[in-house]
Image (spheres, helix red, strand yellow):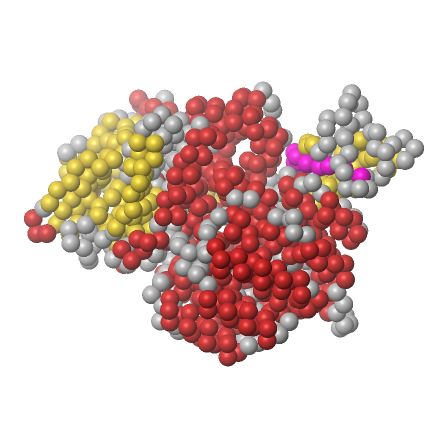
Amino acid sequence: PKVIYLKDYQAPEYLIDETNLTFELYEDHSLVHAQLVIRRNPERAAGDSGAGLPPLVLDGQQLELLSLAMDDRVLGEGDYQLDDSHLTLQPVSSQFTLDSTVRIHPESNTALEGLYKSGTMFCTQCEAEGFRKITYYLDRPDVMSTFTTTITAEQHRYPVLLSNGNPMASGAEEGGRHWATWQDPFKKPAYLFALVAGDLWCVEDTFTTMNQREVALRIYVEPENIDKVQHAMDSLKKSMRWDEEVYGREYDLDIFMIVAVNDFNMGAMENKGLNIFNSSCVLAKAETATDAAHQRVEAVVAHEYFHNWSGNRVTCRDWFQLSLKEGFTVFRDAEFSADMNSRTVKRIEDVAFLRTNQFAEDAGPMAHPVRPDSFMEISNFYTLTVYEKGAEVVRMIHTLLGAEGFRKGTDLYFERHDGQAVTCDDFVKAMEDANGVELTQFKRWYSQSGTPRLQVEESYDAQAKTYSLTFRQSCPATPGQKEKAPFVIPLALGLLDGKGNELPLRLQGEGAAQGVGRVLALTEAEQCFTFVDIPERPLPSLLRGFSAPVKLSFPYSRDQLMFLMQHDSDGFNRWEAGQQLSVQVLQELIAQHQKGEPLVLDSRLVKAFDTLLGDESLDQAMVAEMLSLPSEAYLTEISEVADVEAIHAAREFARVTIGEALYQPLLARYRANRALSRETGYIAEAAHIARRTLQNIALSYLMQSGKAEALEACLEQFNDCDNMTERLSALAVLVNSAFEQAKADALQRFAEYFKDDPLVMDQWFSVQAGCGLPGGLERVQELMKHPAFTLKNPNKVRALIGAFANQNLVNFHRADGAGYRFLADHVIALNALNPQIASRQLTPLTRWRKYDTSRQQLMKAELERILASGELSSDVYEIVSKSLA
Ligand code: B3K
Ligand code: ZN
């Protein structure tokens, strides 16, 4: 596959003003008629006269061309050139209409890109480059067109026919077929096109916008899921209101639709007026979806809705700018979730995820800037860096400008670029212009990859009462980028006195203290800040709220961390102090394990947890977060060379020790919370979610004791609860326990009861795939034979293979390499079926540099085997070849 570079970007030679599509859907093929109103792009027309018009090169893949006409002149084979990805013709005037008919095969499309079938329904996924599998087109985001779409299909099988925009007309045809026409008045790139045809039911509601326009809201699902839609509908209405209140953005069409499909490569897709969702991101009810699933639905519904402005009304010029819409929209949905739930907990979850996964990506062979310079396959760039780090970059702008300044910037951005396809530079320019600031150096966050390190040193002068912090930033080399220039790092901090109170902050040279807590902007490789009037040696609270995506190091003692855990006014940093304490303690255990010494847990960690459990005034969600030890994946990420077995043994040892030492307070908390759960029944609100989370963490520690009393509590919860959160947690701790009979019974009864609900079966697979007890690979191989499993459904692949390779590190990384062989076998099988899913599942193998030499060899050997396995998709080829480079 060839490499595409940002530096080669050129505006399109031609534009498409109008796109008229007619789909004829049949069981063994479909026909697509396209009428495109095309004109020469005036921006490119300067030197045209003498040389004549340039050729028109349309994208098209896996299309069977049946007819072609230009301005009513039928074109024959000599009039155009066809290869497997382009149709090239020679225009004779600068404006013309092109008519084409192609035959395609959605019924056998297992890649789930373009037009395909999910179960009995037809649906589409066009981002990034799927539209070219539907018809010949200028399939690039800077070509924006109005779309009119007519769909014809058998009435009985496909009573519902949907596309973007507003419904215009519909009717019956002979032979039991019917048709519907939709028109989208907003110009859009082809990647936002969508079509759905199926036997669907919908839940309807309305939303009145800030200008009193009534919008019809419809969520379409297969009939058996109609009772699982209310939560998504509530989330949608909250999102629409929030975007009006926080960003002043109003919805623009008269109707907004969401369709749930079972077979989907990603979470969801923001097609104009017709969002298509993975059913896992729409369907939720108490009995079948956990709290986490409810929160995910709320977040993804919001994310896709927010794209209507950040992505659709203002879109990307080219795919290198992907983070323009994704980073910004992730930031928007994170703030929405923070406002709907607990702000601190949302931040903790996002940071834990970023540090575990995006930092690993940024340190690996696929490291790339938030705005990449090149790619082979754009589908491989829907990454944690583009999404999550991209959101951190937008958050830093928000931090530097303040909420008001940021809003001025987004207002200008939306006003200036409405209807346009623009760049990350345009976004930053709007921020600069609206605030009269310069962000030139800040933009390095878009162009430099890698996670910056920030080393901090302190010194206190008791005589002068000054306290100085020296910051040294650096950033490791990443593929293609050896040297890095300093970043602008917004550093939020506060200083605590010996009682835990915040000290007023005045920097040397400032007239008066600027209050407690503030944000410093670091811009140099090395920089020193001196605070004056500091009466005693303070304890600094640094990088509050994780104000920049960096690896901070400051030599805190364990006692200082315990102090911060209790006294820091920043909730995020209270949690962070606890994490750092846990990391120190766990690393000590890891070292003991490696030396073959007996493991001894620092009792201060137990004491800190005891204090947390005893403090009834604390937010339960925070207590739950703070009682959770850093994951094995995070401990891997921060290791120089990850010792899989030592990490697992250390963490398990800590869990057992804590479970035994704090058995009584955990049991008390557990019983109190479980009693409340029974009393109130399931309510999907923050306070209840917090209570259940803590209850379930307590249960998992209690079960570490192996006591019959704990088993009894666990079984009682499993059998007698009214919701999936309690049931699945109980199942998960049983699965990870040594109570073989109880485990087998519970698994069997669960599967029997939920066998017809694919999303619940996904959870059943995941819980088992993640079980770190010996024999994990064999269990997963056995589960692959279960009738509910299929490689063709991405959710199933993620639930079983993905959960095993990403969450069951001790089994996946077995010393004999069998886990690696298993993964590679399935990547090879998936490569032929669904390249996007194949290449995503590969990620764990790309991390081979983290492991000992023996595992490195084994992992590389599997990558080589994939490379040699035959014809590879561009998706898989790019990841494998870059990983081995
Ligand atoms: N924009 C889509 C992603 C589509 C990915 C295609 N390979 C989902 C989202 O970020 O909202
Ligand atoms: Zn998105």
Q: Quadrant of the C terminus?
A: bottom right
Residue 227 in the magenta stretch? The answer is: no
Q: Which residues are magenta?
A: 483-497
| Front-lying residue, 842 or 796 | 796
In terms of image quadrants, where is residue 518?
Answer: top right
Q: Which of 26/302 is in front?
A: 302
Side (left or right) of 644 relative to 56: right
Q: Where is residue 469 drawn, in percent x and y?
A: 79, 37
Q: Is residue 180 visible?
A: yes
Against 118, is 213 above or below? Answer: above
Q: Is residue 445 above or below residue 808?
A: above
**Viewer-proximal residue, 551 or 169?**
169
Q: Position of residue 387 (x, y in %)?
A: 51, 44
What is the quadrant of residue 510 in the picture? top right
Residue 376, image x, y percentages? 46, 48
Asked whether the viewer can see residue 650, the reply is no
